[in-house]
Each structure stands twice: as structure tokens, then as C-alpha cells.
Image (spheres, rainbow, N blue to C red):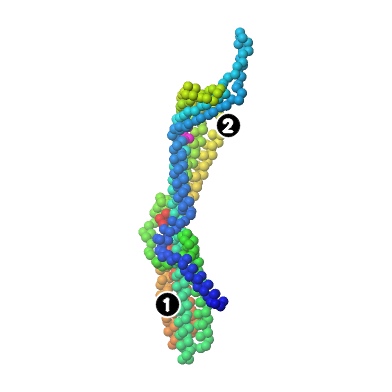
Amino acid sequence: MNFNKIKNLTGLVFFSTSMLLAQVLELDLKTARQIALENNDQYKIAQETVNKAKAQITEARGNMLPSLSAFSQYDRAWELATVVFDDPNLGQISFKMGTDHTIVYGLSFQQPLFLGGAVWSGYKMAKNGFYIAEASLETARQDVLLQSTTAYYGLLFSKSVVRVMAQAYNTAQENLDQVNTLRSVGHASDFDVLRAEVQVANLLPTLTSAKNGAKLAESQLLMVLGIDEHTQIITLEGLKFVPHNYSDTTLEQLYDRALLNRPDIRIMEQQKNIMQRQVALARSGFLPSLTFQTNLQYQGMKNEFDFTDEDIFRSSNSSISLSIPLFLGFKTAGKIQQAKAAVRETDYQQDALYKAVKLEVEAAYLAIIEKEQTVLTQSKIIDQAAEALRLARLRYGEGLSTQLDVMNAESALNQARMNYEQSLFDYNIAIAQLKKALNEL
């Protein structure tokens, strides 16, 4: 077997292996978005954040419930303590106190009765944190949906560019064929043929570039969807114009919908609630705390480590503990001032967010109106440009115009088709961005 046969066999094996590794995936927009949600790491992280916030509520609730714990302790006295005291009759007396071995074990029950509102505030803040996590999950969901929608439309647009450039190449080739036919009967010059050949040659690398762009757009979509790079995507639809349903809706109505639906608005509201509870939490430092506790204890003391049931004695006690803060070096007052400043800061952030949302909704809505008009205009221009090319070819065939007129008409038609596909892409992206602004993707 010579080298060329080995090379061909190796190439065949490599090609066959690549075909086996490659997978074909048929996609529409709905499926693409579902796959993106299933595979996106940031969305999965947001889901786990919700789970963690839910567990934090359980932890905060536990601070309000009683606690029961077991305890045990063993003490070995290597040298007993000496007790000395003076007796009026006997003088100074000293003796050893205690035993060599001491064991203690039992149960302790504790119930907080009042902690200045700190525990309750912590519990409510944990719930606020859970609501923030849920809203953040929705934010992540909307981000993933917008990314997958944009990437999917990007692939559709890239494929439409390939189609337009292929049409342009075919049109230029048809023109070259016409010029060759006319030259054969003496109605066209060699210069006309050369110019038509140059036109075809110039379009070939542009078509190749468009195909490379489509491949890159496919890779981008695969990355957004979290799918293996060897997967081949077959799109089940193309870019199209579908009239939007916002014509009868005012900007003020859209703004109200955004304020009602957007998760970042809910996040800001919950953050403000947390800051307000921080004030209450700081104020609890001025208030007393009251705790109830009951202990059941078993204790044994002997010089030899040979305890029996008769050596163990049972005892129990209950207590209520009251702690009143009198002076903490103005720490509590400082915490209260910080918490109040945080509340005012959140108010300013909330106002800024409202303005940003209003501007985002307005910009997205106006973009839809603009892109819609562009689509309708470009659709008419394509028909006009196609008719202009037909007439230019007809006139050129009859000797009434030049080859330059035909080429200019071809370029105008190609540009009109490209502008139309671009306007379709921009229009659909504008709708997606408005839906994202309204949290309705």
C-alpha cells in the first residue's frame, strides 16, 4: 500500500469518526430556550441560591424555638483544693474539699422568651432574603431567555445573509451568461464580459465569508445552549415579520406593567424591607432579654472510680434570666444611625431604578416602532429593486443601456435584500428586548 492510499484511508477514517461524533439537532425558538434553561450554569446557581435561602428561613425560625441539649463532664482532681478558715475556739482550721473523681451528666432545656425583637427581625429578614433569591432566579431566567433568543435570531440572520449572497452570486452569474450570449451575436464587448466576470469573482469571497459567519453564529448558539460543539443545528424556521401586539398600548401602560412584573423592582422592595428591619434589629440592643432554662442533672463524686447507682444523685432546677443593657459605649446608637442611612440609600436607589426601567421600556418600544417601519419600507424597496434590475437587463439586451447600469441595479437589489434581512433581525430583537423589559419573555 503506497503513501497516497494510506493518506486517503486515514482521511476516510477521520471523516467517518467525525460524522459519528456529530449530532443533528432540529431547533425552533421555543426548543432553544428550553435547552438553554436546562443547561445554563448561572440559572442553576440561581436555583441553588433559592434552596439556600429557604434553608436560612428554617435556621432563623429555629432561633425562636426551644432547644434541648444533653451534657456530660468528668473531672479528675490530681490535687484537691485546701479550704482554710478561722475558728474562735480552735483557731485556724484547714481541710481538703472534694473527691478525686467527679462525673456530671444531664439534660438542659432553654426557651428564649424575649430578645428585644432581634430573633423575630432575623426571621423576617430571612424571608426577605428568600423573596430576593426567587426574584433573582427570575432575573437569571429572563437573561438566559434573552441570550438564547438573540443567539437563535443571530443564526437565522446569518443564514439569511448566506442566502442573499448566494442569490447575488447567482444573479451575477446570470448576468455573465447574458453578456456572453450578447457578445456571441456582436451586441456586447469584451470589456462588458470582463466587467461581468469581475463582478462574479468579487462575490465569491463575500459568499464564503457569509458562510463562515453562519458557522460562527451556530457555534455561538451552541455555546449559549450548553450543547456539544460537534452538534449540527437545523433551524425549523426563518426570520419573519409578525406584527407586534403593542400598537394599542401606551407607554405609560407598558411602564406600569414593567413596575408590576420586573424582578429587580421586587428585589429592591425586599432590600428596602431588610434595611428597615435592620433598624429594628439595631434598636433591640437597647431592650432587655429574657430567657427560661430548666436543667436535670445527675452527679457522682468518689475517690475511687467505681461508681454505682447509689453513688449518683439527681438534682433539677429552673431559672429565668433577665439581662438589661445599661451602657454599651454608644455602639447601639451607631448601629441605628447606620441602619437609617442604609434605608435612605435604598430609597435613592429605588428612585434611580424606576427611572432606568422607564427609560429601558421607552427605548425598547420606540425601537420596535422604528424597526417595524424599516421592515415595511425595505419590503417595498426589494420589489422596486427587482423590477429595476429586470428593466436594466431588458434595456441592456436591446442596446439601450450599459453593463454598468445592470451591475448597479444588481448591487441595489443585493443591498435591498440585505437591508431587509437586517431589519427583520433588528425588529425581532427589539420585540425580545421589550419583552425582557416587561419580564414577559
- Residue denoted by label 2: 329
Which residue carries the number 1 mark?
386
For the residues carrying marks 2 and 1, which lies nearer the camera in this image? 2
The N terminus: image quadrant: bottom right
Residue 129, x across and y down, in percent: 46, 44
The residue at the point 50 percent across, 74 percent down is 207
The answer to whether 412 is drawn above or below residue 246 in the figure is below
Q: Quadrant of residue 38?
A: bottom left
Which of the two labelled residues, at mark 2 and mark 1, occupies the earlier sequence position? 2
Point out the residue furthest to the top here. Answer: 89
Q: Nearer the viewer, residue 285 or 319?
A: 319
Residue at mark 2 to residue at mark 1: CA–CA distance: 85 Å
Confirm whether the magenta stretch covers residue 352: no
Q: Is residue 355 left or right of residue 94?
A: left
Residue type indicated by callout 1: Ala
Res 354 visible: no
For mark 1, give the secondary structure. Answer: helix
Type of the residue with mark 2: Gly
Which residue appears at 48% of the width and 31% of the height? 70
Looking at the image, which is closer to me, 436 or 386? 436
User: How many numbered callouts?
Assistant: 2
